[in-house]
Amino acid sequence: MKKRDKKVFKRKDLNISNIEITHVDDFLDDAITHERRAEKKPAGKSKISSKSNLNLVRGRIMELYSNYKCLVKIDNEELVCHIGGRLKQYDLDTRNILAVGDWVKIDISAKRRIEEIEERKNTLYRYTEDSFQKKIVVAANLDNVVILTSCKQPALNFGMVDRLLCATLLADINPVICINKTDLADDLESLRNEAEFYLTTGFKVLFCSALEQKGIVELQEALKNQDSVFVGHSGVGKSSLINALQPGLNLKEGDVSDYTGKGMHTTSRSRIIGWEFGGNLIDTPGIKTLTLHEEMKDEIKYVFPGMAELGKECYYPNCSHIHETDCAVKTALNAGNYDINRYESYCRIMESFTGVDYE
């Protein structure tokens, strides 16, 4: 049998030039050729796979190597898998397709391809700081977000805690506030008084010192048999605290920059680490900032600490608690029944949204 000749495609040399049309009737629509480009498919169709009838194996993403390559745990075995080409074709609203913590279904008959991503219980996002605010998935299927800050080096930052609390609650994840490096506190009792606001509004607050091994047992109990992620600025002692929670992990610990007074990244990519006391840590690179999406601005007042209950007493049902009259939050503020620092933090968050001006 004669071997089929391979087709040879030759690029045409096309010259583009302006032409003058004296009569419109002489211009034929048939002469127009439209360039065909591949279009992204709707994201909803990503849940429907033509390979669902195959013997797909369920696993969980343990570590991301790239957007298309990751480590998946199937039962007690860990395999390097690639994402199927079909999943790359969908118009997702996130920069990354996969996230650590995702449950996926894999075709292991050939090249260990991920063919399906199961619906997530919840997702922790951050957003790019450009005008498009593209979503970046931090982690998926979480029980807790440990919001970590430090007394000093870097300085205590309750404003960052407020932002992370809002992001965590809007994602329907349980927050745990952890104040680390208490060994550096000038006055521990004064620090506890500063954090009292969060305790009285129903949040769990732990005071820890990795150096002095304080608060470690309490933090272990809070995270036991659950999937948790630590989030906070670089340098707040995330790695050192995790090493104290589970000695032997030997996560690389970073220093605080003498120039900026801020921490330097030590974690380079996301991964899941099993706790010996039960549950999992989802270890992610330090997040220096957490930009909330502009679409969240109308929801912030419902999740900001202490505002939801007070807001029920406002005259206007959609009160922003900033410029309206007959506002229960401002009444409580003037009476000394709401923390002025937290109210100012709330105003800064609201003013950070594009196009919002509450002057």
Image (spheres, rainbow, N blue to C red):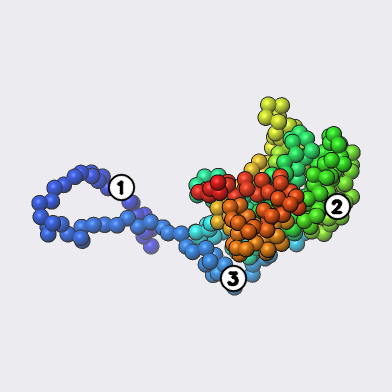
Q: Is residue 36 visible?
A: yes
Disc 2: which residue: 220
Give the image location of residue 220, x and y in percent.
85, 52
Mark 1 surroundings within 10 Å by alpha-carbon count, few (fewer than 14), some (14 through 19), many (20 or more): few
Calculate the distance from the C-alpha at mark 3 to the C-alpha at mark 1. Answer: 40 Å
Give the residue displayed 76% in from the left and 33% down from the top.
153
Q: Nearer the viewer, residue 73 or 302?
A: 302
Is 143 situated left or right of 188 in this image? left
Front tag of 3 and 1: 3
Q: In which quadrant of the rendered image does the N terminus lie?
A: bottom left
Residue at coordinates 82% horizontally, 59% vertically from top-left?
Answer: 225
The residue that mark 3 highlights is: 52
Residue found at the far top of this picture: 259
Q: Quadrant of residue 190?
A: top right
Is there a contact, CB below 8 Å, between mark 3 and mark 1?
no
SS class, disc 1: loop
The picture places residue 286, in percent across and down from the top left corner, at 69, 42
Q: Position of residue 278 (x, y in %)?
A: 84, 57
* Amino acid at circle 1: Arg
Instruction: Please tell me which of labels 2 and 1 falls first in the chain.
Output: 1
The mark tally for this picture is: 3
Q: Nearer the viewer, residue 20 or 8?
A: 20
Would residue 97 be visible to someone looking at this image?
A: no
**Residue hosting label 1:** 11
Residue drawn at x 64%, y 43% is 289
Outermost left residue: 22
313, 93: nearer the viewer: 313
Say which amino acid is labelled 3.
Answer: Ser
